[in-house]
Image: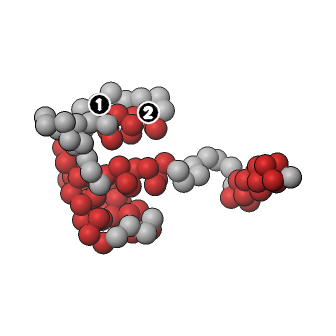
Amino acid sequence: MPQSIEAEQSSVADVEVLSRQLHTEKNTIVNIVDEWKVYQMEDDLEEKERLDYYWKEVISQKQEGGKPKYKFLPLLIKRALILPHGNADVERSQQECGNCRQTRTG
């Protein structure tokens, strides 16, 4: 389903903001945004049940010469996927992480 121009522009702006918030270098942000625009135009992959499986397919796409299709976009995708994104509140997540650390060291 084609996105509206407003949705595409909003998506590009969101990618730029997320890149900045994840402390990405300015030159790299420009490249990420450019690759995001290409991704939006060419996305023809099947939807996956798991988000990480979908993005793994995107990241592993190759150009005709065998080089990776996206050089900079994976930097953002990998950083975004490691962020906690569950429904648990922050305190409970931190408590669970603390318990894991204590179990390993304790």
Q: Secondary structure at mark 1?
A: loop
User: Is 101 on the left or on the right of 59, as rendered?
Assistant: right
Seen from the viewer's position, the closer of residues 5 and 86 is: 86
Q: How are the colours assigned in the image?
A: secondary structure
Q: Is residue 1 above or below residue 11?
A: above
Q: Position of residue 103 (x, y in %)?
A: 82, 48
**What distance separates the C-alpha of mark 1 from that of mark 2?**
11 Å
Q: Total of numbered circles in the picture?
A: 2
Question: Which residue is rendered at x = 29% and y = 65% of the image?
Answer: 28
Q: Position of residue 59 (x, y in %)?
A: 33, 41
Q: Position of residue 78 (x, y in %)?
A: 44, 50
Type of residue at label 2? Tyr
Residue 57's quadrant in the figure? top left
Give the label, 1 or 2, closer to the camera: 2
Type of residue at label 1? Leu
Q: Secondary structure at mark 2?
A: helix
Can residue 92 be seen?
no
Q: Which mark is residue 45?
A: 1
Residue bearing the label numbered 2? 53
Q: Residue furthest right?
A: 106
How packed is label 2: few (under 14 Cα within 10 Å), some, or many (20 or more)?
Answer: few
How packed is label 1: few (under 14 Cα within 10 Å), some, or many (20 or more)?
Answer: few
Q: Is residue 6 above or below residue 21?
A: above
Can residue 35 be seen?
yes
Q: Which mark is residue 4?
A: none
User: Is 86 on the left or on the right of 79, as rendered?
Assistant: right
Q: Is residue 70 above or below residue 51?
A: below
Question: Which residue is rendered at x = 81% and y = 53% of the image?
Answer: 105
Question: Which residue is rendered at x = 57% and y = 49% of the image?
Answer: 85
